[in-house]
Image: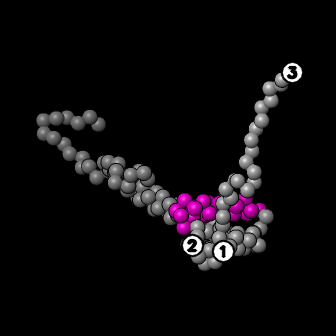
Amino acid sequence: MRTNQTLTQTPAPEQTPKTQFPDKLKDYVARTFEDCPPDEKVAVELELKRIITDAFNEKVVWSLEWDKMPLPQTILARKKVTAKEEQTAKTLAMGQMSRVSNETGASPTSPFTRKPNYSNVMDVDYPGKKRKR
């Protein structure tokens, strides 16, 4: 009696192409996690993956001077500072626009739009017309 069996072929480990990494990149990865605080590990791993992926995509992984590259923690810290500076600048700009708005009656979203100011209109009587009082 014959049975139908399906055989699945899996490549032998030596047949699977293995990605090679430069030794300096391996050192870079090791330095990354030497002093990495546990609460930052996930963010650091993501940034590290982004850096390495970008290097492979740009085909510079073998030519980069990994020993001179800033660590992912440093890059993330710079991004945080830049984001805070941008937020501060945006807040200051909105504060200035609000101040302009209060002084001129302009909208904070459009500092060039003025509300009409009728306080300087003269009270004029026209001949032949009676004003309602």
- Element class at badge 3: loop
Q: Which mark is residue 64?
A: 2
Q: Are marks 3 and 1 in contact (CB under 8 Å)?
A: no
* Position of 9 relative to 40 (above/below): above
Q: Position of residue 105 (x, y in %)?
A: 39, 52
* Position of 46 relative to 37 (above/below): above
Image point 83% across, 25% down: which residue?
3
Image point 54% across, 67% down: which residue?
60
Instruction: Kindly tell me whether residue 126 is visible in this rendering.
Output: yes
Residue at mark 2 to residue at mark 3: CA–CA distance: 63 Å
Q: Which residues are magenta?
A: 39-60
**Can residue 48 be found in the magenta stretch?**
yes
Image point 58% across, 70% down: which residue?
62
For disc 3, the marked residue is: 1
Determine the image quadrant of residue 133.
Answer: top left
Q: Position of residue 121 (x, y in %)?
A: 26, 49
Q: Of callouts 2 and 3, which one flags the residue occurring earlier in the amino acid sequence? A: 3
